[in-house]
Amino acid sequence: MSRPRPPAPRGRPGFAARLRRDWPLLVMTAPAALLLILFHYLPTLGNVIAFQDYQSYLGDNAVDSFVQSPWIGFTNFAELFSDPLFWASLRNTLFLTGFQLVFFFPVPIFLAILLNGILRPKLRTFIQSVIYLPHFFSWVLVVTFFVQMFGGAGLFAQTMQSHGLTPPDVMTNPHTFFLLVTAEGLWKDMGWGTIVFLAALAAIDQSLYEASAADGAGRWRRLWHITLPGLRPVIVLLLILRLGDALSVGFEQFILQRDAVGFQAAEVLDTYVFYHAIAVTDYGLGAAAGLFKGIVGFVLILIANKVAHRLGEQGIFAKS
């Protein structure tokens, strides 16, 4: 007696079948996809200006300006790389990025671990709301808050003067400006990072803690062998994303304080593009600087993702 044949494997559904099955998901994602296309991918075509002597007044519209502007090859890049102010702004940007990375990861992780140990849900929710609130403030409001607290006529200075002490120069000292912008960014965004790491902590299997406690592992050993390895995929992912944006430390935060500390301390790539390209209508130079930022960020993402694979993490995309 012959054995019955196993059922034939079902093939992949056709396009029409998948469209009937997934059309609600496509409808929900269509607005987000449209926004990305209109405000991200289409403007990316403007990078062609980096290779042109772009003149915005040529022709009757923007398309004519693109078509009629003469091609000059890599002249804009040669002008960019020969400008000492560009290299000074690049050094400031890389220094601030590296310094902020040292604090932007440990502090949210530390706060998330502390909040995760709070047993009263109402107290934990209140603290989360308080530290997350500055994330929604504009940089104008953040800088104003620091001026009112630490400026020459701020609360901190007045309190020290009332006790016969000389307050330090916090808001206008170019030598400590990197500490100031790091403190501002940390106060503004550490709540967001804390929420992310709290979600990662919630995904760790609690039975691991119970088993390690039963085996006699103390609090610090559980932290080192369970909590931190459980957070490692999120840490690696956020680190890769941050490296991809390494040359964009912010525009509003620096332009608001540039006059107070001087351009030598506050000039970063974004402010360089504004003052030396956009303000003087040298759009080709600005496009070259923007394309340079994009290429460097893309290369850093590839390198960081490769390192993540070597460490056994998935990164932002899997191995090919």
Image (cartoon, rainbow, N blue to C red):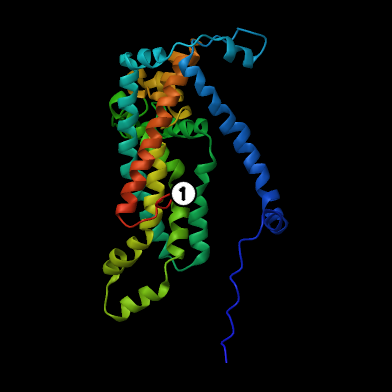
Q: Is residue 173 left or right of residue 190?
A: left
Residue type highlighted by circle 1? Gly
* Res 156 seen here: no
* Res 64 seen here: yes
Residue placed most toward the observer, 45 or 57: 45
Name the residue: 51% across, 20% down. 48
Vertical side of 203 occupied by 165: above or below: above
Q: Position of residue 55 (x, y in %)?
A: 55, 9
Q: For residue 272, what is the image quadrant?
A: top left
Name the quadrant of the N terminus: bottom right
Vertical side of 284 occupied by 250: above or below: below
Q: Residues within 10 Å of mark 1 (few under 14, many from 20)?
A: many
Q: For mark 1, what is the residue?
A: 191
Q: Is residue 246 left or right of residue 35?
A: left
Name the residue: 36% across, 73% down. 209
Q: For residue 37, what is the image quadrant?
A: top right
Q: Position of residue 182 (x, y in %)?
A: 36, 37
Name the residue: 42% across, 53% down. 318
Residue placed most toward the observer, 293 or 48: 48
Q: Is residue 163 left or right of residue 47?
A: left
Q: Is residue 23 left or right of residue 304?
A: right
Q: Position of residue 64 (x, y in %)?
A: 63, 12
Classify mark 1: helix, strand or loop.
helix
Q: Position of residue 115 (x, y in %)?
A: 42, 60
Residue lying at the far top in this picture: please name it. Answer: 58
